[in-house]
Amino acid sequence: MSDPAQPAGPSSDPKPGDAGADYEVGLEAVGRVLAWCAQQILAERRSAVPDPKRLEQMKVRQRECAADQNRLEDAEPD
């Protein structure tokens, strides 16, 4: 008997513990954050009255995120 909440057949959804899928999800998430930081930096620079403190904070976050991306690329599956 099949469970309607669990349809039969192959699924393309990543499964927990699937190292390749986990890597791709992580890389995609870091990429989205990097893009968001870049947008925030650009918006602040274009602002009529740029806030130097916010601009510096966003640059720091962007650098930290880039470092996370580098660590992710070098990470082992476990």
Image (cartoon, helix red, strand yellow):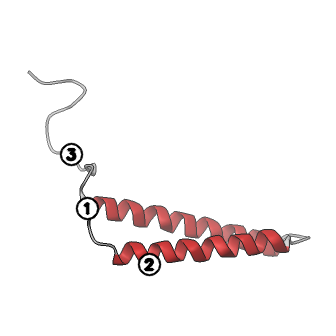
Q: Nearer the viewer, residue 26 or 68?
A: 68
Q: CA distance from mark 1 to mark 2?
A: 17 Å
Q: Nearer the viewer, residue 9 or 54?
A: 54
Under mark 3, the amino acid is: Ser
The reply to whether dot 2 and dot 3 touch (C-beta < 8 Å) is: no
SS for callout 3 = loop
Q: Position of residue 19 (x, y in %)?
A: 26, 61
- Residue at the (51%, 77%) spot, across then down: 67
When the figure is inspected, residue 23 is found, relative to residue 16, above or below; the finding is below
Q: Position of residue 70 (x, y in %)?
A: 44, 78
Q: Going by the image, does 60 lie left or right of 35?
A: right
Q: CA distance from mark 2 to mark 3?
A: 30 Å
SS for callout 2 = helix
Q: Residues within 10 Å of mark 2 (few under 14, many from 20)?
A: few
Of the numbered discs 1 and 2, the one sitting upstream in the chain is 1
Q: Position of residue 46 (x, y in %)?
A: 81, 73
Q: Going by the image, does 16 lie left or right of 58?
A: left
* Residue farthest toward the left in the current orientation of the protein: 1
Say which residue label 2 marks: 70
Say which residue label 1 marks: 19
Say which residue label 3 marks: 11
Residue 8, picture quadrant: top left
Q: Position of residue 47 (x, y in %)?
A: 85, 70
Q: CA distance from mark 3 to mark 1?
A: 16 Å
